[in-house]
C-alpha cells in the first residue's frame, strides 16, 4: 500500500475498527477517549501522526451526539498534530433523516453535520448506505457511500426461499430494494408508508402482489422497529406467507425494537456491524460484518486514491 497510515477508533464501535485494522494487517493506533467529570469529551492521540494518512473509525450510533463530538475532537487532535490527511470512516452517519425541511422553522441537521465534520479538517468521508444519496452534496469534500447489500445478500445465502419477494418498506428504499432484488433475482414489492410520529408509521398501499409469497423486507436502518413491525403486519394482511426475513444495514435496535420484531412469522433479522449491536440471546438476530468491504475500499483508496466498485 502506498501511504503510511494509522487507524484510530472512538468509543462508538472499537470492535469494527479492530476488524478493519486486522483486514489491513495493522494495529489500531494508540489514543485515549474519555470523559471529563462534567461529561465533556477528553481525547488524546498517543502516537505521532505527522505527515501520515489518518483514518478515524466512528459511527454516529447512540449516544449520537457524544459520538459525534468524539469524532470532531479526534479529527481536531490529528489536524493540530499535522496529519497529512484525515479520513472519517462513519459507517452510520446520523441525522441523515433531517435532509430537508418539513416546516418553515425546522433545521436541515444533516447539512450542519457536514459543516462540522469539514470544519475540523476531515478531508474525506467513507460511509455506508446513506439514507439518501444526495446527502453527499451537503459536503465539499469527497464522500464515498459504500453499500452493504452484496455482503448481506451473501450472508442470506440458502436461508431465502426461491419464491421470495423483496419488499421496500417505503418509497425511499426502492433503490435499495431493487439492488437486493437484482442480487437475488427476486421481484420487488413497494409499501407506501405514512409517518404518524417519530416512532409510529402506517402502511397505506402495497404495490405488487405478495399473496402466498415469503418476503424479505429491507431497509437502511432499524431504529424503533416501528417501520418493520407495520410492514410485517401489512404484508401478512395482504396474504404474504408467514415466512418473513428482515434485513437492514444499520441495526440501531433501540429499546423496544426487539419486542416489535418478535413476530412468529419473522424467521431472521439481519443487520451489519456498522453500529455495535449489543443485543445478546436473540436467536433470530444475525450480525454480518462489513469490515471486509470497508477494508477493501480503503485498500483501493490507499493504492491509487480510487475506491472502485462501491460495494
Ligand atoms: C425512514 O425513512 C428510514 O429509512 C427507516 O425506515 C426508519 O428510519 C426506521 O425507523 P424505525 O425503526 O424507528 O421505524
Image (tube, grey):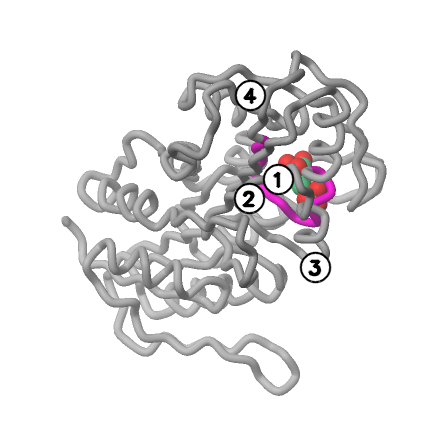
Contact, CB < 8 Å: mark 2 with mark 3?
no
Label 2 to label 3: alpha-carbon separation = 16 Å
Label 1 to label 2: alpha-carbon separation = 8 Å
- Nearer mark to the viewer, of 4 and 1: 1
Q: Nearer the viewer, residue 81 or 309?
A: 309
Where residue 56 sits, quadrant-wise, is: bottom left
Label 4 to label 1: alpha-carbon separation = 14 Å
Q: Nearer the viewer, residue 276 or 132?
A: 276
* Earlier-in-chain disc, 1 versus 3: 3
Q: Is residue 242 visible?
A: yes
**Ligand 1 quadrant?**
top right
* Earlier-in-chain disc, 4 versus 2: 4
Contact, CB < 8 Å: mark 4 with mark 1?
no
In the picture as drawn, the residue positioned furthest to the top comes out as 208
Label 1 belongs to which residue?
266
Task: Decide whether residue 220 is among the magenta residues.
Answer: yes
Label 4 to label 2: alpha-carbon separation = 16 Å
Label 2 belongs to which residue?
269
Label 3 belongs to which residue?
255
Query: Which residue lies at the image location 55% right of the left edge and 80% below the top edge?
Result: 35
Horizontally, is 102 left or right of 69 in the view?
right
- Nearer mark to the viewer, of 1 and 3: 1
Contact, CB < 8 Å: mark 1 with mark 2?
yes
Task: Decide whether residue 136 is among the magenta residues.
Answer: no
Secondary element type, mark 4:
strand
Amino acid at each position: 500500500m502506498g501511504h503510511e497510515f494509522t487507524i484510530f477508533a472512538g468509543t462508538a464501535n472499537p470492535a469494527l475498527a479492530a476488524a478493519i485494522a486486522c483486514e489491513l494487517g495493522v494495529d489500531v493506533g494508540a489514543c485515549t477517549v474519555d470523559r471529563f467529570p462534567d461529561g465533556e469529551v477528553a481525547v488524546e492521540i498517543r502516537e505521532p501522526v505527522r505527515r501520515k494518512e489518518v483514518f478515524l473509525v466512528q459511527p454516529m450510533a447512540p449516544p449520537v451526539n457524544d459520538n459525534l463530538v468524539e469524532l470532531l475532537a479526534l479529527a481536531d487532535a490529528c489536524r493540530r498534530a499535522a496529519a497529512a490527511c484525515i479520513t472519517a470512516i462513519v459507517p452510520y452517519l446520523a441525522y441523515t433523516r433531517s435532509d430537508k425541511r418539513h416546516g418553515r422553522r425546522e433545521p436541515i441537521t444533516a447539512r450542519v453535520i457536514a459543516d462540522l465534520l469539514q470544519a475540523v479538517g476531515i478531508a474525506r468521508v467513507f460511509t455506508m448506505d446513506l439514507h439518501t444519496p444526495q446527502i453527499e452534496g451537503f459536503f465539499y469534500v469527497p464522500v464515498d457511500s459504500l453499500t452493504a447489500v452484496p455482503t448481506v445478500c451473501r450472508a442470506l445465502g440458502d436461508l431465502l426461499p426461491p419464491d421470495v419477494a423483496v419488499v421496500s418498506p417505503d418509497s425511499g428504499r426502492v433503490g435499495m430494494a431493487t439492488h437486493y432484488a437484482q442480487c437475488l433475482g427476486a421481484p420487488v414489492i413497494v409499501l407506501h408508508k405514512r409517518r404518524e410520529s417519530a416512532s409510529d408509521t402506517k402502511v397505506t398501499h402495497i404495490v405488487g402482489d405478495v399473496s402466498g409469497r415469503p418476503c424479505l423486507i429491507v431497509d437502511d436502518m432499524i431504529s424503533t422497529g416501528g417501520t418493520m413491525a407495520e410492514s410485517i403486519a401489512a404484508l401478512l394482511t395482504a396474504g404474504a406467507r408467514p415466512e418473513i426475513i428482515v434485513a437492514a444495514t444499520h441495526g440501531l435496535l433501540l429499546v423496544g425494537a426487539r419486542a416489535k420484531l418478535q413476530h412468529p412469522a419473522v424467521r431472521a433479522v439481519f443487520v451489519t456491524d456498522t453500529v455495535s449491536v449489543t443485543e445478546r440471546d436473540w436467536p433470530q438476530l444475525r450480525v454480518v460484518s462489513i469490515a471486509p468491504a470497508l477494508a477493501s475500499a480503503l485498500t483501493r483508496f490507499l493504492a491509487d486514491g480510487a475506491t472502485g466498485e462501491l460495494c
